[in-house]
């Protein structure tokens, strides 16, 4: 059952994936792969159940007994959550045309997909889980060969080889009759041509490569699902708690330094641009650009300091626990103000120079770090943080999905168009490099700026096939079909930065 499901999902994935422009095919492939691995989870549950053990006491199931919680807490719920996050991340390619956004989501989907089949609760367990899929694919090969030779689907009386033969015969019959029907009706031929993969030599080679890669990945995933790794023991050894003075003095001094910095930030936030000009001798945009990255580094390092202090601080007495809550809680609260200051600086920077992808992504990261400090504050108050590592990854995934939901390229275009309508300043060259998601917002510009901003996007917007269907590109085509681009290259030479 597992091998048949994995093979079918690999064939579907290799046939529907579009490598040039992401679209509907990626979502279909993700759903097929998730279904195949779900079948492996069902088989694992059946083979590890007491009923199966009683009915076949001497049988070799090919799957080890499931370890409670080995795939995360609370077990299957966590698996389903990571699997749903993986599908949602890959689905971004069906709704958004921004290639950079889909690349980020695809990288994140690799991580969440790995956690869905391996698990891991502790930071060390989650890191080790990321290294398991390549080795699992190699170890799964002899496991699959044994399954082909010895196993038959329960109650079917038919082996894996005969199932493959049946599938091959089905493919031959569908191809033969499909070609006959296509030659008989042009409409049917267009429909079939959009659904079927390219059968040219180069297309066949690409299909085989995709089949091998996807099939190997699914085989390794199925192996990990049916034989879950034990990641519960991968936790740092407990260390001797530090002396109260040993950890209290550095944190008190650090809290004092943070408090002084926060006071300065509050004067900037409420003093306005005039205060910055009088005090620092800089423009407001220079002040924002100069300190943002330092504040970002401070935010990340503070999380590390809190993690180490929370681990080493003694908690045996009530006074120790109160001291931990006060000092670490204060540091987390002051860090929230620093995060707010960094966000404010980035807002000022964007107002001065316009919105860009980098500035939007950095702002999203800062919002995520602010949420982490809130979660850290909760963990400090409870003096328990077993759930925190999973929420760190989960909130990062939610932040990325939230960014995709905002439609970043369109948001950037809207902000820059609004800024142009207010100030008359616009970087047409940068806007012309955005994806098709930005077309509805850029259409608000007056001519010839509208055509100059949309010319490059329109030139790279061919018609999609069925499996490359994408909502963002389809919306852009509708706008461009209604009001085509009209400006020439000569008209745009003087408008690259207006």
Image (cartoon, helix red, strand yellow):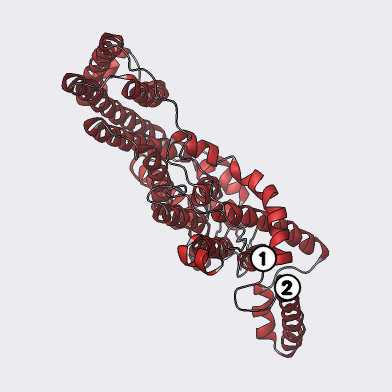
Residue at the disc numbered 1? 7
Secondary-structure class at tag 2 = helix
- Please tell me whether residue 150 is drawn above or below residue 341 in the rendered image: below
Q: Residue at x 44, y 39 (%)?
A: 361
- Quadrant of the frame with the N terminus: bottom right
The answer to whether one can see residue 473 in this image is no
Direction from residue 180 to residue 363 in the image, left or right: left
Q: Which mark is residue 164?
A: 2
Q: Quadrant of residue 270?
A: top left
Residue 330 to residue 476: above or below:
above
Q: Position of residue 195 (x, y in %)?
A: 65, 73
Dot 2 and dot 1 residues touching (CB under 8 Å): yes
Query: Camera-side residue: 70 or 299?
Result: 70
* Residue 55 x, y percent position in the rendering: 53, 69
Label 2, residues with CA under 10 Å away: few <14, some 14-19, many ≥20: some
Where is residue 496 shown, x and y percent of the image? 54, 40
């Amino acid at each position: 059952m597992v091998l048949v499901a994995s093979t079918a999902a690999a064939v579907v994935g290799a046939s529907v994936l579009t490598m040039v422009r992401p679209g509907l095919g990626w979502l279909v492939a993700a759903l097929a792969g998730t279904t195949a691995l779900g079948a492996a989870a069902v088989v694992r549950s059946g083979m590890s159940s007491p009923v199966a053990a009683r009915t076949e006491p001497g049988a070799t199931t090919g799957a080890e007994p499931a370890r409670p919680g080995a795939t995360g807490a609370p077990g299957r719920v966590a698996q389903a959550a990571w699997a749903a996050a993986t599908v949602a991340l890959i689905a971004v390619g069906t709704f958004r045309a921004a290639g950079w956004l889909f690349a980020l989501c695809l990288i994140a989907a690799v991580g969440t997909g790995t956690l869905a089949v391996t698990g891991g609760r502790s930071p060390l367990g989650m890191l080790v889980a990321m290294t398991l899929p390549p080795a699992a694919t190699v170890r799964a090969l002899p496991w699959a060969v044994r399954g082909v030779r010895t196993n038959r689907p329960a109650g079917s009386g038919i082996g894996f080889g005969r199932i493959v033969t049946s599938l091959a015969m089905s493919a031959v019959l569908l191809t033969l009759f499909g070609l006959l029907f296509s030659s008989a009706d042009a409409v049917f031929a267009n429909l079939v041509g959009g659904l079927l993969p390219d059968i040219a030599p180069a297309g066949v080679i690409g299909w085989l490569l995709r089949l091998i890669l996807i099939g190997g990945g699914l085989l390794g995933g199925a192996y990990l699902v049916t034989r879950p790794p034990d990641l519960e023991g991968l936790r740092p050894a407990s260390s001797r708690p530090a002396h109260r003075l040993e950890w209290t003095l550095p944190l008190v001094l650090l809290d004092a330094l943070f408090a002084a910095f926060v006071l300065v930030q509050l004067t900037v936030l409420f003093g306005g641009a005039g205060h910055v000009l009088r005090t620092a001798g800089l423009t407001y945009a220079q002040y924002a650009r100069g300190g943002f990255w330092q504040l970002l580094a401070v935010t990340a390092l503070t999380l590390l300091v809190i993690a180490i202090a929370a681990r080493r601080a003694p908690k045996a007495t009530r006074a120790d626990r109160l001291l931990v809550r006060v000092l670490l809680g204060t540091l987390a609260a002051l860090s929230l103000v620093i995060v707010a200051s960094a966000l404010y600086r980035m807002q000022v920077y964007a107002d001065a120079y316009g919105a860009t992808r980098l500035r939007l992504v950095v702002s999203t990261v800062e919002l995520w770090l602010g949420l982490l400090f809130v979660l850290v504050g909760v963990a400090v108050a409870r003096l328990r943080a077993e759930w925190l590592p999973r929420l760190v990854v989960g909130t990062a995934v939610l932040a990325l999905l939230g960014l995709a939901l905002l439609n970043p390229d369109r948001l950037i275009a809207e902000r820059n168009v609004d800024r142009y309508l207010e100030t008359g300043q616009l970087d047409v060259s940068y806007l012309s490099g955005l994806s098709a998601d930005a077309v509805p917002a850029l259409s608000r510009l007056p001519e010839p700026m509208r055509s100059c901003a949309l010319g490059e996007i329109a030139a790279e917007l061919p018609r999609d096939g069925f499996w490359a269907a994408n909502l963002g590109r389809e919306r852009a085509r509708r706008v461009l079909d209604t009001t085509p681009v009209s400006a020439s290259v000569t008209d745009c030479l003087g408008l690259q930065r207006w």
